[in-house]
Image: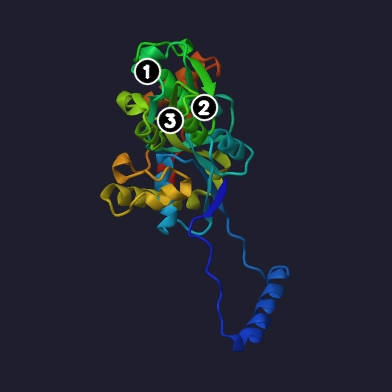
Amino acid sequence: MSYIKANGPAGPLRGRRKGTGRLTALLLCLILLAALPGCGSKKQPVLTVGVLPDLDSIPLMTAAQSGYLPDNIHLEVYKSPVDRDSALYSGHLDGAVSDLAAACLAAANGQPYKALSVTDGCYRLVAAGKTDIRSIQELRGKRVGLSVNTVIEYAADRLLKAGGLSPDQVEKTAVPSIPTRLELLSAGKLEAAVLPEPYASAAIAAGGRPLGSSADLQMDAGLLLFSEKTLSQKQDLLAALLRGYNQAVRDLNSGAAAPAAAADALGLPASLTPDQLPAYRPAVLPGEADVAAAAGWLADKTIIAEPPAFSAVCGDLERILSRG
């Protein structure tokens, strides 16, 4: 995991050798003054958001690198949804690029987290190039790599059903790390895997065969998830985050910003090109039908007893945006 401040660290302080002693004395005075009760500046609140190596996270990273976010908004990059969730639910993160399944699960279990906006990405079911598999039906009894109880498994189940298979007719293999999932698929140790872009394109470029895509199903499931404490106490920072996000979306869609630097910071494959990006949307809540579908999936799997209401899953986006 790497830690990334929105605007990066300050450059080194350079002074003339002649004034070094005077500068040192001044710095010491400032440090002593800051240590006295009531003399230091008030500590700024910080908003820390977890991101993943996927296309959903490109706008946030682009906003950070473009200087659209204030210094006290920090991004942390995680390799897997499991590590991200551990950081989020332990309180280390204020929010994260997550998914609708996670938001519905949190709401159903009474956990204080709500979605604030959908994110745009694409999840593809890819067969290993070292196999002869060319259709979803040929996956019967085969190993399919995914991360369980996340949008990846949600996408897998919907794609399998669309292709004529029941999800229990394949051998689901839990591989939380996205890069590891790609490596196992490329090595032929998985017959297929569900991967977010651009990892799916990297797998296909290496010989994998595309079997289906969440775009084919018009499935919208990635989102920004925040704690209710953050939604209540850090509204100005959230408004600043969304303003930066929306500006980055405009830049990416118009071609004013290229994704290469953001991709590198997220640990994405170097093969990412602008034409692999989706048409990103400004911050918007998921639709009620999308929430109901994800919640129904969790209930069908008996992960939750009852699907939560839309209001229990989603935060008040308009209220946050109005603070801008």
Q: Nearer the viewer, residue 262 or 112?
A: 262
Do we see residue 76 in this rendering? Answer: yes
Disc 3/disc 2 C-alpha distance (Å)? 10 Å
Q: Residues within 10 Å of mark 3 (few under 14, many from 20)?
A: many
**Residue at 47% across / 28% down in the picture?**
187
What separation in Å lies between label 1 and label 2 (alpha carbons)?
24 Å
Q: Nearer the viewer, residue 90 or 316?
A: 90
**Residue matched to label 2:** 147
The residue that label 1 is drawn on is: 132
- Say whether residue 274 is left or right of residue 113: left
Q: Secondary structure at mark 3?
A: strand
Q: Secondary structure at mark 2?
A: loop
Determine the residue located farthest toward the left in the rendered image. 254
Is 22 positioned to the left or the right of 317 in the image? Answer: right
* Quadrant into which the N terminus falls: top right
Q: Would you name the residue on which mark 3 appears?
A: 195
Type of amino acid at the residue the image marks with label 1 = Asp
Residues at marks 3 and 2 touching, judged by CB atoms closer than 8 Å: no
Q: Earlier in the sequence, mark 3 or mark 2?
A: 2
- Residue 47, given in percent of the width and then of the height, sits at 54, 50
Residue 200: quarter of image: top left
Question: Who's the residue at 45% across and 14% down the image?
Answer: 167
Tag 2: amino acid: Ser
